[in-house]
Image (spheres, rainbow, N blue to C red):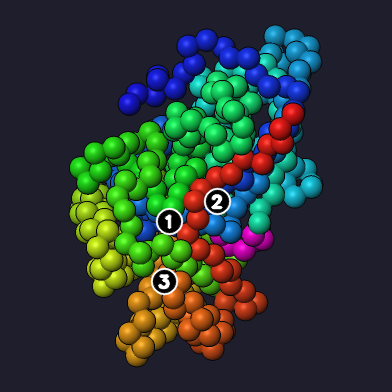
Amino acid sequence: MEAVGFIPASQQEVITDKTVTWSAPSNIALVKYWGKYDPQIPANPSLSFTLNNCKTKTSVALTHKNLGSDKHAQEFSFEFSFEGAPKPDFHPKIASFFTRVVDYLPFLKAYHIIIHSENTFPHSSGIASSASAMAALSLCLLELSNEFSSSGPNNFSEDFYAKASFLARLGSGSAARSIRGPLMQWGKTAVFESSQDLIAVPFNQELAPIFKNFQDTILLVDKGEKVVSSTVGHGLMKNHPFAEARFQQAHDQLAVLTESLVSGNMEKFIEVVESEALTLHAMMLTSDPYFILMKPGTLSIIEKIWAFRKLTLIPVCFTLDAGANVHLLYPEMHKDELLQFIENELVAYCQNGQYICDQVGSGSISHTEAP
């Protein structure tokens, strides 16, 4: 697959008589993506659970813009509001995204674009929303492009979702995995024949029953802004002394994790998922300059999880994103015991006692009303 294949053969008619709306979920990587090449190409493959409850819902409408001058004709014209309030500080990221995708959505410079967005989870909750936000925005823009016909909501073609993943990736790499669900793989690897660097593809094997309706309770250890952004962290992998070994490790871990997801081998699943989380942060600890995103509460929660698992033999594990918060992963059958464990022993390490209960979901949803 080549990027040029996503450029429309001709300018499509666009939809200007209605507002389109999509919701897209966050995702949590099991095999981590850390390190990339231009333009948003992953240095190693990744595999993620698509979440169900933590979503961004975005509405987009097009109006004809007043060109005024040749200069304005060459600029993007848009307005953005988040949860009902204008957010001009988000404009540079949106403008950068438009610059990257304009060849694939040629109408962007011809119209004024009105964007309204909101999250189903608190914006300050410490959950990275760039994946869900860029996925939802890409789906809206692609529907407005009218490039793919649809007979109604949820009847969009595979080509539509493939291009949406391609576009979302150019806004935020992990957003490529937030288009579909429940398990998405991104980055070329021998483990999956259908794998791509340009798009994420659904896990193509039957999941063992224990992984269906898998739970993810997100323990909010720290909701502040990260001292080092993910963009900067990815960049530090370019000269990292352990980069090549890490990239190969991701391929190897992906193969082991795939086998465990199919066979239901929880012991191997836990081993790989926790190893991947700690390896991600090990790369941060050993980069130049080095940095730490975990907090004391993060480590305390990890130790509590290990002790609980040893005592009860309940197959629960943790993973971490590029931050301090802990994702507690476990089968649905153990939900009651785990929620009690959280209340009894883990909530004390959560900022303001906050945590979010989520589970594996099926991916993005169209909310566009029929004309």
SS for callout 2: strand
Q: Is residue 8 left or right of residue 272?
A: right
> Which residue lies at the image location 47% right of the left edge and 53% below the top edge?
50
Query: In which image quadrant can residue 94 be found?
Result: top right
Q: Is residue 143 visible?
A: yes
Q: Does 322 appear above or below 215?
A: above
Amino acid type of the residue that numbered disc 1 sits on in the rendered structure? Phe
Q: Nearer the viewer, residue 333 or 225?
A: 333
Q: Identify the residue under disc 2.
A: 25
Q: Does 134 appear above or below 345?
A: above
Q: Identify the residue under disc 1.
A: 49
Measure the alpha-carbon separation of dots 2 and 3: 20 Å
Q: Identify the residue under disc 3.
A: 331
> Which residue lies at the image location 28% right of the left edge and 66% below the top edge?
264
SS for callout 1: strand
Q: Give the mark, 1 or 3, whose residue is nearer the N terminus.
A: 1
Percent from the top left, x then y, of residue 85?
A: 79, 47
Amino acid type of the residue that numbered disc 2 sits on in the rendered structure? Pro
Q: Give the mark, 2 or 1, whose residue is nearer the N terminus.
A: 2
Amino acid type of the residue that numbered disc 3 sits on in the rendered structure? Pro
Asked if the residues shown at circle 2 and circle 1 are in contact, with their CB atoms under 8 angstroms apart, the answer is no
| Residue segment shown in magenta | 121-127
Query: In which image quadrant can residue 1 be found?
Result: top left
Indicate whether residue 275 is drawn in magenta. no
Asked if the residues shown at circle 2 and circle 3 are in contact, with their CB atoms under 8 angstroms apart, the answer is no
Q: Is residue 210 left or right of residue 96?
A: left
> Which residue lies at the image location 41% right of the left edge and 71% below the top edge?
331
Per the picture, the main secondary structure of the magenta-coloured stretch is loop
Percent from the top left, x then y, of residue 96?
A: 57, 32
SS for callout 3: loop
Q: Is residue 303 visible?
A: no
Q: Nearer the viewer, mark 2 or mark 3?
A: 3
